[in-house]
Image (cartoon, rainbow, N blue to C red):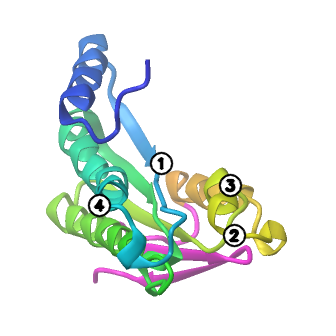
């Protein structure tokens, strides 16, 4: 069964199972997340706010903490974040804060572990089940393949990206919006 992404104990069990195989991990891509359909902060249930942070940032911290020992030298982690973490979305304040934390965490890890690589990809509206939950007209959203292509380029070390980069993909166009220099 799939682990609870917000459960440190379940992630630890998964990490141990992988360690027992002796495999070294080259790249990890975090592509999970949660957004509450409720846009009025005062109406959001505390448990939905907690789920937002549990899934969007705490799980990434736990996964990174527990999988770092299994990452090979020159390996990396890509986190699929959101443009809401770069330019706060006033309709989804908790979500925006959680995604900004993802971007800061990935940059902190890039500084902490210069031998490995850490990136945030921040898609604009993209055709996903999560988008359908909060947008009435997904027709203006981008194809998720543009995100996959960027991840592929990062893994292949193409495109001039540097560990710690926060890269926005909106309408299929890429822009590095933050770099740790």
Q: Nearer the viewer, mark 2 or mark 3?
A: 2
The residue shown at (46%, 76%) is: 92
- Please, which residue is most extreme toward the front here? 43
Which residue range is magenta in the image?
158-181
- Indicate which disc residue 46 carries: 4
Q: Is residue 13 above or below residue 70?
A: above
Q: Residue under circle 1?
A: 32
Q: Earlier in the sequence, mark 3 or mark 1?
A: 1
Instruction: Give the spatial CA distance, label 3 vs label 1.
Output: 11 Å
Answer whether residue 64 is magenta in the image: no
Instruction: Give the spatial CA distance, label 4 vs label 3.
Output: 25 Å
Q: Which quadrant is the N terminus positioned in? A: top left
Q: Residue under circle 3?
A: 128
Q: Residue under circle 2?
A: 135
CB atoms of marks 1 and 4 within 8 Å = no
123 horizontally vs 14: left or right = right
Answer whether residue 171 is magenta in the image: yes
Instruction: Give the spatial CA distance, label 4 vs label 2.
Output: 22 Å
Q: Which quadrant is the C terminus positioned in? A: bottom left
Percent position (x, y) of residue 59? Answer: 29, 47
The residue shown at (34%, 52%) is: 51
Percent position (x, y) of residue 76? Answer: 36, 50
CB atoms of marks 1 and 2 within 8 Å = no
Q: Nearer the viewer, mark 1 or mark 4?
A: 4
Q: Secondary structure at mark 3?
A: loop
């Amino acid at each position: 069964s799939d682990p609870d992404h917000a459960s440190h104990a379940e992630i630890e069990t998964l990490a141990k199972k992988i360690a027992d195989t002796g495999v070294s991990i080259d790249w990890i891509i975090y592509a999970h997340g949660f957004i509450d359909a409720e846009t009025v902060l005062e109406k959001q249930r505390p448990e939905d706010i907690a789920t937002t942070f549990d899934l969007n940032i705490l799980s990434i911290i736990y996964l990174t903490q527990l999988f770092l020992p299994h990452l090979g030298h020159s390996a990396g982690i890509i986190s699929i974040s959101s443009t809401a973490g770069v330019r706060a979305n006033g309709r989804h304040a908790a979500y925006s804060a959680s995604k900004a934390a993802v971007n800061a965490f990935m940059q902190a890890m890039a500084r902490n572990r210069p031998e490995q690589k850490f990136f945030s990809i921040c898609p604009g509206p993209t055709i996903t089940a999560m988008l359908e939950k909060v947008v009435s007209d997904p027709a203006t959203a981008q194809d998720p393949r543009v995100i996959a292509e960027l991840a592929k380029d990062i893994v292949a070390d193409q495109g001039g990206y540097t560990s710690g980069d926060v890269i926005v993909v909106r309408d299929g166009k890429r822009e590095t919006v933050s770099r740790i220099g």
